[in-house]
Amino acid sequence: MKIYIGSDHAGLELKKKVKKIFENQVDFTDVGTFTEESCDYPDFGRLVAEKVLAEKGSKGIVICGTGIGISIAANRFQGIRCALCTSPELAEMSRLHNDSNVLSLGARILNIEEASVIIEVWLKTKFEGGRHRNRIDKLDS
Ligand code: RB5
C-alpha cells in the first residue's frame, strides 16, 4: 500500500523519524515540507489529500504541531476521511468504523515511540464495513 506523507515545519522532525522507520518497510512518498522554514499546513494537507484521492487504495499521513490544522485541511476534500489520533485505540477505531484514509499526528503532542505505535495499528487495521458502510457513504453525499 502506498503512503503519502506530508507535514508543515512543526511536523518536520517527527516526519523525518517516521520516514526512518518506514525505510525498506513501507512504500511512501514525502510531499513536503522539506525544510524548517515556516510554511502553511493547508498546503501540505491539500497535497496529501490530492495524492490519496488520485491513487485508489493509497493512504496518507499528515503531521503538524498539534495535528489539528492539517487534519482540518485534509478533511476539506471530498472522499478524505482524516482522523487525528492521539492513541492506538483511536487509530484502530478510525479504521474499523470510519475507514479513515488519512492519519493526522501532532508533533508537539506525540513522541516517535507513541507515534509509531499509532501508525502501526492504523496501517494494519481493516475497515469493518457492514453498518458503517452506509455512514461512510453519507459523508460524501
Ligand atoms: C504551526 O506553528 C502550528 O500552528 C501548526 O503546526 C499546527 O499546530 C496547527 O494546527
Image (spheres, rainbow, N blue to C red):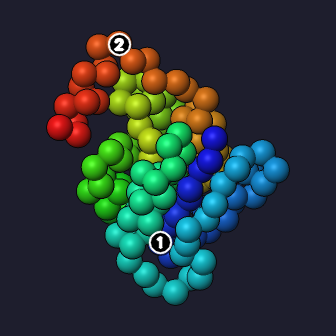
* Label 1 environment density (alpha carbons within 10 Å; few <14, some 14–19, many ≥20): many
Give the tally of numbered discs.
Answer: 2
Looking at numbered disc 2 in the image, what kind of residue is underneath it?
A: Gly
At x 31% / y 20%, what residue is drawn?
132
Residue 134 seen in the current view: yes
Q: Is mark 1 within 8 Å of ligand 1?
A: yes
- Residue 141 image point, x, y percent: 17, 37
Identify the residue under disc 2. 130
Identify the residue under disc 1. 8
The disc, 2 or 1, on the residue closer to the chain's N-terminal end is: 1
Relative height, residue 135 to residue 110 (above, below): above
Q: What element carries label 2?
A: loop
Q: Which of 105 and 133 is in front in this view?
A: 133
Q: Which mark is residue 128?
A: none
Residue 89 seen in the current view: no
- Residue 124 image point, x, y percent: 61, 29
- Residue 25 image point, x, y percent: 78, 45
Q: Are marks 2 and 1 in contact (CB under 8 Å)?
A: no
Left or right placement of residue 55 versus residue 114 in this view: left
Left or right placement of residue 122 versus residue 23 in this view: left
At x 63% / y 60%, what residue is drawn?
29
